[in-house]
Structure formats: C-alpha cells, structure tokens
Image (cartoon, grey):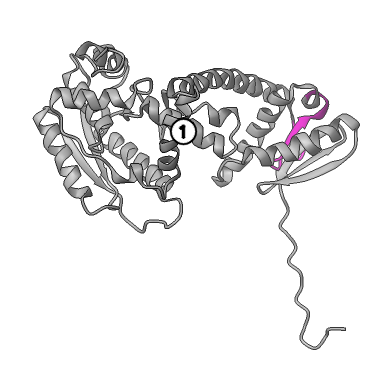
C-alpha cells in the first residue's frame, strides 16, 4: 500500500497537527471532537503521539439519537485513557427536531464543544473532517444552489464563539484514516446514519464513486473549493473596502444605512452584491437574524435596485425585514415598517 493511500506515518501526523498543537502552537489548549468513528479516532491517536503538544482534552458528544450512543462514548473514553488523554462526555439534552435533525445536531455539537473549551481554558477545537467530507459538502451546496461562498466548502480553520475551529485532516482521504486506525490497533465504530438514505449527505455519498468515474473526484472537488475560497476571500475584502467608501452619514441618526448609489452601481456586480450583503447583515445582526439567502439578495439588487440606480428611477424592495430604497442617487437600508393587518369586516356588514 502506497503512502498516498496507506495509513498516516507518525511524522505525517505530526506535520498535519504540529501547527495546531505542536511546541510552536499559538494556542493555550485544544479540545478534540471525537465521536468514535475512524476519522476522529485517528485524530485522537495521532494527537496523543505528537511531541511537545499543548494540553489536550478529548470530548465526545452523546446526541442521544441511537441506543448505543452511550456505549460508544464510553469506548472513546476508554481509548483516550489508554492513550493518556483526559476525556469528557457531553450530552445533547432537550427535545430533538423532526426536521433538519442533522443540522440541529451539528449546531448543538459545536455549541457544546465551544462551551467545554472555554470551561477548560482551551482556545482551539479540532475536528477530523476529511477530504471526503469536503467533497460531500461542496456537492450538497451545489444541489442547494449555493454561490461561490458556499461552494468554497469548509475552511481549514474558522472562528467559533471566540475560539478557533480547525480541521487538520481536510486534505486527507477517509480511507487513509481508517487504515491508520487499523494499523495502530485503535478501535472505532461506524455510525449507521452515514449510510441512512433519509439524510441528503448519505445519499450523495453513494454518488461519489459514480462521479469519480467521470473525473469528478474528491480531489477535484476539494481543489474547486480551494479556488473558490481564495477568490471569495479577495472579493469579500474588496466588498468591505467598497462599503466603507459607499457609506454616507445619516442625518437623521435613526439606524439607517445610506450608500452612494452612483458609486455602488459602477462597481462590478460581484463586489456590489457582497457590499450590500454586508450592509444588510450589519443591520440584521442587531436582531440576531439569520443570513439572507443569496438568490433573494440577487433578485432585489441585481434585478431591481441596481438597474433603478443606473436609470435614476425610484425603486423599493423589502428584503428579510428591511426596506431597501433607491431614490435621489442613494440606496437607503432601514427596518421595514410593520405590515398593515386588514380590518375584519363586522358580521352582517357584507354588501
């Protein structure tokens, strides 16, 4: 078995994990998210073997969704003890949604991990997402109609509740982590939800071998994500700079945002779209509202407001609780007025 598809060598694991947990790590401590599957088990094992590592704490989230989840968490605790690492099991309590279960579980998992890290004085959370996970993510977002930001996939590192979430194995195929566990004698479990056709990710997982036969391999999907992530970073920076230049003082001081319309309309549409998206997000942050979907922003800005600004005609559009008004050479963003509720007609007054 070659080095490209065989188990990770100890030195290779050190190279992948060293920037995060090695002697020169800028972090105080790390929480390792370990479910008991082969990917996260390999993460735990390789981290335990790293030289001069920062303090580590293994965390297993028991979602309470399967009868064997408690036993699996106990198995992780046993292996962690064998490897000389402390372990905590955290339970996802409360009611579980019937729709969007995997998304809700992921959100709960990250919240629990961040909370544990803060409690333990750690400022880094490591997960074992792989090349295969990245490919599946890109395909899922492609099916959902995502734009470049979504198709950029998972970032190797991102902020998480004041901490850093990092994915050191994002360029490594899952098969190599399975081989690593088997070569080192690290026991692992298989999550049956990974092949459950009720979940979209599991259905797409079955398509990957067929797509690879046509040349759309996991490596190429990961390369696509990396290119889009690079381009999106540049566009986001350009949009932030443009928004600073576009903003005008609000004489009323009532929380509105006023943007210079002529300059906005002269921008490349990709930059204009992101600049207005940042402006919308800044107003919605006050209400802790979720992000606006790209297609809704495109319809409001590209199909209506920008053409109106170029033509010098007034135009108004509502978007996610905001009123966007193109008039007088400016684009104004403000909270939308409450909708009028039709008055009920008293009984017997019908004409």
Q: Residue at x 21, y 28 (%)?
A: 44
Q: Quadrant of residue 48?
A: top left
**Where 276 sits versus 109, above or below?**
above
Whole-percent x and y of residue 49?
16, 19
Q: Residue at x 17, y 26 (%)?
A: 182
Across the whole image, how many numbered discs are drawn on residues? 1
**Where 199 sits versus 219, above or below?**
below
Residue 210 magenta-drawn? no
Residue 251 magenta-drawn? yes
Q: Secondary structure at mark 1?
A: helix
For residue 303, side relative to residue 312 (left or right): left
Residue that extends furthest to the left in the rendered view of this protein: 82
Whole-percent x and y of residue 130?
36, 27
Q: What residue is pinned by disc 1? A: 137
218 or 252, nearer to the observer: 218
Can residue 97 be seen in the rendering of this structure? yes
Q: Residue at x 43, y 42 (%)?
A: 203
**Which range of residues does the magenta coloring cover?**
249-263
Whole-percent x and y of residue 24?
28, 11
**Where 44 sits versus 199, above or below?**
above
154 or 246, nearer to the observer: 154
State the quadrant of the C terminus: bottom right
Q: Quadrant of residue 6?
A: top left
């Amino acid at each position: 078995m070659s080095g490209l598809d065989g188990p990770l060598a100890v030195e290779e694991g050190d190279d992948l994990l060293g920037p995060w947990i090695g002697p020169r790590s800028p972090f105080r401590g790390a929480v390792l998210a370990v479910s008991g599957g082969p990917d996260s088990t390999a993460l735990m094992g390789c981290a335990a073997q790293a030289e001069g590592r920062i303090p580590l704490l293994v965390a297993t989230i028991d979602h309470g969704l399967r009868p064997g989840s408690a036993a699996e968490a106990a198995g992780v605790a046993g292996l962690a003890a064998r490897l000389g690492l402390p372990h905590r099991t955290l339970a996802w309590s409360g009611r579980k949604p019937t729709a969007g279960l995997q998304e809700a579980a992921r959100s709960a998992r990250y919240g629990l991990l961040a909370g544990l890290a803060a409690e333990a004085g750690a400022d880094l959370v490591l997960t074992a997402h792989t090349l295969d996970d990245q490919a599946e993510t890109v395909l899922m977002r492609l099916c959902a109609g995502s734009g470049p930001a979504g198709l950029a996939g998972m970032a190797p590192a991102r902020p998480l509740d004041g901490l850093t979430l990092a994915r050191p194995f994002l360029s490594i195929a899952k098969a190599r982590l399975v081989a690593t566990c088997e070569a080192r004698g690290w026991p692992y479990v298989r999550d049956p939800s990974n092949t459950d056709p009720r979940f979209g990710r599991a259905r797409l997982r079955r398509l990957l071998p067929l797509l690879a036969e046509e040349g759309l391999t996991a490596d190429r999907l990961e390369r696509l994500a990396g290119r889009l992530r690079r381009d999106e970073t540049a566009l986001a920076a350009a949009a932030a700079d443009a928004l600073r230049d576009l903003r005008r003082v609000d004489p009323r001081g009532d929380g509105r945002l006023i943007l210079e319309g002529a300059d906005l309309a002269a921008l490349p549409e990709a930059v204009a779209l992101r600049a207005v998206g940042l402006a919308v997000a800044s107003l919605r942050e006050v209400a802790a509202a979720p992000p606006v979907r790209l297609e809704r922003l495109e319809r409001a800005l590209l199909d209506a407001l920008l053409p109106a600004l170029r033509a010098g005609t007034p135009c108004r559009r509502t978007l996610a609780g905001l009123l966007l008004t193109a008039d007088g050479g400016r684009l104004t963003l403000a909270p939308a007025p409450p909708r009028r509720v039709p008055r009920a007609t008293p009984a017997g007054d019908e004409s």
